[in-house]
Amino acid sequence: MLTTGLATVALGVLALAPRLPRLARRYDAAALAPIDGTPAEAADSPLRHRLDAWVAKGAGHGATLLPWSRPAVPTPLAIAFTPASHARAVHHFGYRLAGYHQLTRRSRVGGIIYRLGVQLRPLAWFLPRRADEPWDDAWLARADEARLDALSRWLPRRPTLIVLEGEAADSAGRVAQALAHAAQHGDQPVRLLVLGKRPADTPSGVPLTPL
């Protein structure tokens, strides 16, 4: 009986071992900057539905059969652009996509439990990603050389939405080029949303969608 129990524990440890390094991954503040502030409630809009469909398309389900396998991501990087006047609606969408609203509606203890569940999610490699699972988020107003260098080395720890506005939107092509490393070597979908005109000089083969 004891031998069986020890064997079960050993198998469990072996199964989890390939996933443990993922627990150590943290939000990369050198490459990303989180959405700031709580947005005002926004009415349901056609733009929100288009954003929902865009981030989900080609994102994959995130599950794998074996703990050491990498999840399939049909479209690792996709780019979209929408007028800067949509910033408020995009802010609200990104806030909810990142799950911040889940924290505001919970108690302090409930928020801690929620955060813990998010952090431990990589251990459940066999479960498909739920529609309400939080993404990492970034809202960049500037994309200087230090930021671009960090993005060129960055790998996503979970699905990630990056929004560019202002000066960063003007540099969208360079940001997209910097994200080529994440698209090639990462195993999570990355979505780059530009608040402004159609970006130029984006990587070939990367979907570019007007919203």
Image (spheres, helix red, strand yellow):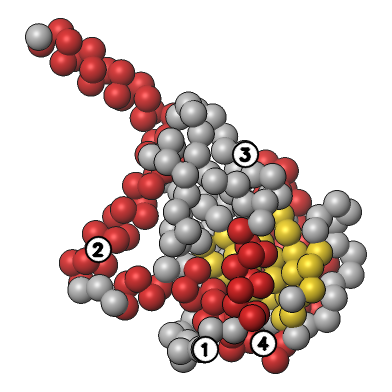
Q: Disc 2 vs disc 3: which is toward the camera?
A: 3
Disc 3 from disc 4: Cα separation: 32 Å
Nearer the N terminus, badge 3 or badge 4?
A: 3
Disc 1 from disc 3: Cα separation: 34 Å
Disc 2 from disc 3: Cα separation: 30 Å
Nearer the N terminus, badge 1 or badge 2?
A: 1
| Residue kind at label 3, given as amino acid type | Ala
What is the secondary structure assignment of the residue under circle 1? loop
CB atoms of marks 2 and 3 within 8 Å: no
Can residue 211 be seen here? The reply is yes
Relative vertical location of residue 92 with respect to residue 51 in this rendering, above or below: below
Residue 150 location (% of width, % of height): 65, 58
On the image, numbered disc 4 is attached to which residue?
A: 86
Relative vertical location of residue 24 with respect to residue 104 in this rendering, above or below: above
Location of the N terminus by quadrant is top left
On the image, numbered disc 3 is attached to which residue?
A: 72
